[in-house]
Amino acid sequence: MTKGTASHGKMGDKKTHVPCRRCGRRAYNIRASFCASCGYGKTATMRTYNWAKTH
Ligand SMILES: [Zn+2]
């Protein structure tokens, strides 16, 4: 294992997040089949937290 950015070379090899149908953010996880931003695919209600800025 090397230190720094060298090990990041494989990053971007496989995409995990695609644009979400509900919130439009590139947060829909293909493998887990849910949106990390709004919870689409996991919950019928919007994933919201009061600490999360909506803008
Ligand atoms: Zn979403």
Image (tube, helix red, strand yellow):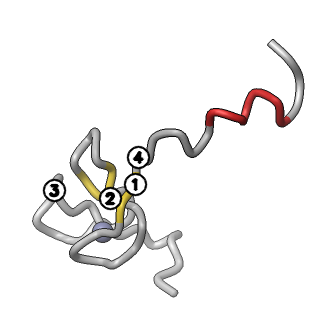
Would the CB of label 2 be found within 8 Å of ligand 1? yes
Amino acid type of the residue that numbered disc 1 sits on in the rendered structure: His
Asked which quadrant contains residue 21, the reply is: bottom left
Q: Secondary structure at mark 1?
A: strand
Residue 4, position as x, y percentages in the image: 88, 32
Label located before the other in sequence (4 or 2): 4
- Amino acid at pointer 4: Thr
Separation of marks 4 and 1 at Cα, in angstroms: 4 Å
Tag shown at residue 17: 1
| Tag 2 and tag 1, C-beta contact below 8 Å | yes
Circle 2 Cα neighbour tier, 10 Å, few/some/many (<14 / 14–19 / ≥20): many
Residue position for label 2: 28
* Distance (Cα) linking label 2 and label 3: 9 Å
Residue 9 drawn at (x, y percent): 71, 35
Q: Is residue 48 left or right of residue 53?
A: left
Q: Are marks 1 and 3 in contact (CB under 8 Å)?
A: no
53 left or right of 20? right
Kindly identify which numbered label has been placed on residue 49.
none
Q: Position of residue 26 (x, y in %)?
A: 42, 67
| 3 with respect to 21 (left or right) | right
Q: Residue at x 57, y 45 (%)?
A: 12
Task: Name the amino acid type tagged 3.
Answer: Gly
- 4 and 3 marks in contact (CB < 8 Å): no
Distance from the alpha carbon under mark 4 to that under mark 3: 15 Å
